[in-house]
Amino acid sequence: MGRADDIYSLPKDLPVPEDDGAAAHLSGSHLPYPLLSDSEFKLCDALRLPWFETSGMRLLKRLTWVVRDGCIERVFYSVFPPDRNAAAVLTWIRTC
């Protein structure tokens, strides 16, 4: 599969979240990777990601990406049941 930015004109300016409590949550999360904010839905729209609207809020549907060397190798959607998704992703990674 090609690099994502070769396929789509992806936004290059997705910020690290600094507002709405996200930064406070991240400070204690110890994630080994940066978490990006897409509050303007630039990435969502560029990749035509699935979303829904409720109570006046636009929300992304659950999905899991496997990304290696800047390439999206696999997308798991829909994430159901959500408590089994991590095991399914790990199984896929181990068999590749």
Image (tube, rainbow, N blue to C red):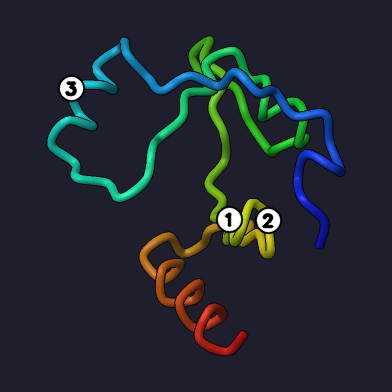
* Residue that numbered label 1 is attached to: 65
Q: Residue at x 62, y 29 (%)?
A: 52
Q: In the image, residue 11 lies at what x, y percent? A: 69, 23
Quarter occupied by the C terminus: bottom right
Q: In the image, residue 22 lies at what x, y percent? A: 29, 22
Quarter occupied by the N terminus: bottom right
* Residue that numbered label 3 is attached to: 24
Three-letter amino acid code at disc 2? Answer: Ile
**Image marks 1 and 2: residues in contact by CB distance under 8 Å:** yes
First in sequence, mark 1 or 3: give its number. Answer: 3
Left or right of 91? Residue 72 is: right
User: Mark 1 falls on what kind of element?
Assistant: strand
User: Mark 3 falls on what kind of element?
Assistant: helix
Three-letter amino acid code at disc 1? Answer: Trp
Three-letter amino acid code at disc 3? Answer: Ala
Q: In the image, residue 5 lies at what x, y percent? A: 78, 39
Q: Residue at x 53, y 46 (%)?
A: 62
Q: Identify whether 41 is placed above or below 66.
A: above
Characterize the local packing of mark 2: few (<14), some (14-19) or many (20 or more) Cα atoms within 10 angstroms.
Answer: some
First in sequence, mark 1 or 2: give its number. Answer: 1
Characterize the local packing of mark 3: few (<14), some (14-19) or many (20 or more) Cα atoms within 10 angstroms.
Answer: few
* Residue that numbered label 2 is attached to: 72
First in sequence, mark 3 or 2: give its number. Answer: 3
- Residue farthest bottom in this picture: 95
Left or right of 25? Residue 53 is: right
